[in-house]
Every structure is written in C-alpha cells, then in structure tokens.
Amino acid sequence: MLTTAGLDRLGIRVPAHDGARRLLTAFAKPIAAPSANPSGQISPSRAEHVVKGLDGKVELVLDGGACENGLESTIVDCTGARALLLRPGGVTRDALAAALTAAGCDPEIDIAAPLGNDENPLAPGQLASHYAPNSSVRLMAKSRDGNEELIGFGTVQGAGKLGLNLSPSGDLIEAAANLFSMLHAADAVHAETIAIAPIPVDGLGEAINDRLRRAAAPR
C-alpha cells in the first residue's frame, strides 16, 4: 500500500546514475524511492535543493553531484495494447519508440492528458499544476515585463536580478540540465513573476515544456 499509493500497480525506477546503482548494489534489497521534494513544488536537481525542501524530514542526503539530465524520469504505462506516456522526461519520445520497435512492440505512443488538481494521478507529475515555484510563471516571454525575473533561452537573454539563460546556444540538453536549478534560483530572489523564454517542443523540449506548463498552471 505504501509503495502503490493505493493503486493496483507500481512504478519501477531504472536509474542510470552510477551513485544510485552503487547504492542499490550495496543494499541488495528493494528500495522504495519517492521523489526527494515536497509534492507539487520544484523538483530538486542538486543536493542543496533536497536539503532545503526536506529540512528536518530526512536524516541523510547522498550528494552525487548535480543531475546530469535535470529532468525527472520518463514514466510509461505498458499495461495496455499501446504504450501510454504518463510523464515525458529525460528519455525522449523518439528513444521510447526505438526501444518499442526493437522489442517488437507498437512504436506509436499515446500521451495521458493532464489531470485536474482534485483527481487521483496514476503517476507523479500528472496533475495540471505541479513543479511550481512560489512565484507565478509566465511562458513564451521574449522580453521582461516590469519586475519579472526573465529566464532566457537561445537569443532571448535573461533579465532581472540574475539574468539567467537556460542555454545561450539553444541546446535542449543544456536547458534540461539547468531548468530546475534556475527555477530554484529565480524563486529564491522572491520575484513576483518568473518569465520563461520560448522553448522548442522537439526532443527534450517536450518534457521541458510539460514541466513549464504545469509550473504556470492555476493552483
């Protein structure tokens, strides 16, 4: 019950991180691994984010360095006739389709619609509002409006107290790695609004835009 949240299924994490794999090998038993942040808030991508979010609630934090990808895991429901993408993440849709093809399965992937905040999700990150900073979030911003903290991307320069840019070169891998860390930093300066430059939707951009839509959704 504790590992299924009352549902009839559970999710199996397959970590790529060497530190996580070494921990699993050393412990040699099943580990229940919920997300390391309060539900609904910005996900951590560094140990200090975990400490800040869960201060006094955990006894130990293993610091394996900043997350290489920066986004949470991709969650796929394979219990039906076709794969259902519950949450886009570090493994892109194209990579999933290639894996399904290699396994002799239908490579077409359906995507689950966002749920209302009063509905019960099948997996983390399905609610319309999630991954949200304390500041409000404005998307598709090409310039700063008033006292906003603008996080840029590509040729759209960051502006405000921090002047952050997810990737000056327009690299989606770099943008994904920086996303949550920069949201944490922008939230920490107590901006009333965090504005985010447009992000392409291809590749990792699908997951980045998914997180930003949920961060900007009404709460």
Image (tube, rainbow, N blue to C red):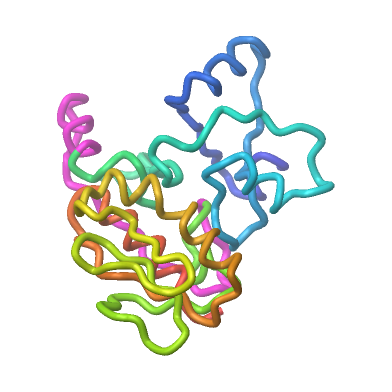
* In the image: residue 105, left or right of residue 53: left
- Indicate the quadrant where residue 153 lies: bottom left
In this view, the residue in front, 20 or 8, is: 20
- Where, quadrant-wise, is the C terminus in this rendering? bottom right
* In the image: residue 36, left or right of residue 121: right
The residue positioned 47% from the left and 54% from the top of the image is 180
List x then y, in percent, for residue 218: 50, 81
* Residue 81 visible in the displayed image: no
List x then y, in percent, for residue 31: 65, 26
- Is residue 21 depicted above or below 171 in this figure? above
In this view, the residue in front, 154 or 159, is: 159
* Residue 103 visible in the displayed image: yes
List x then y, in percent, for residue 215: 47, 69
In this view, the residue in front, 27 or 48, is: 48
**Numbered circles on residues, count:** 0
Magenta residue check for 118: yes
The residue positioned 67% from the left and 56% from the top of the image is 38
* In the image: residue 169, left or right of residue 85: left
- Where, quadrant-wise, is the N terminus in this rendering? top right
Q: Give the extent of the magenta segment.
A: 95-123
Magenta residue check for 207: no
Query: Magenta region's main secondary structure?
Result: loop
The residue positioned 56% from the left and 42% from the top of the image is 46
- Is residue 215 depicted above or below 141 in this figure? above
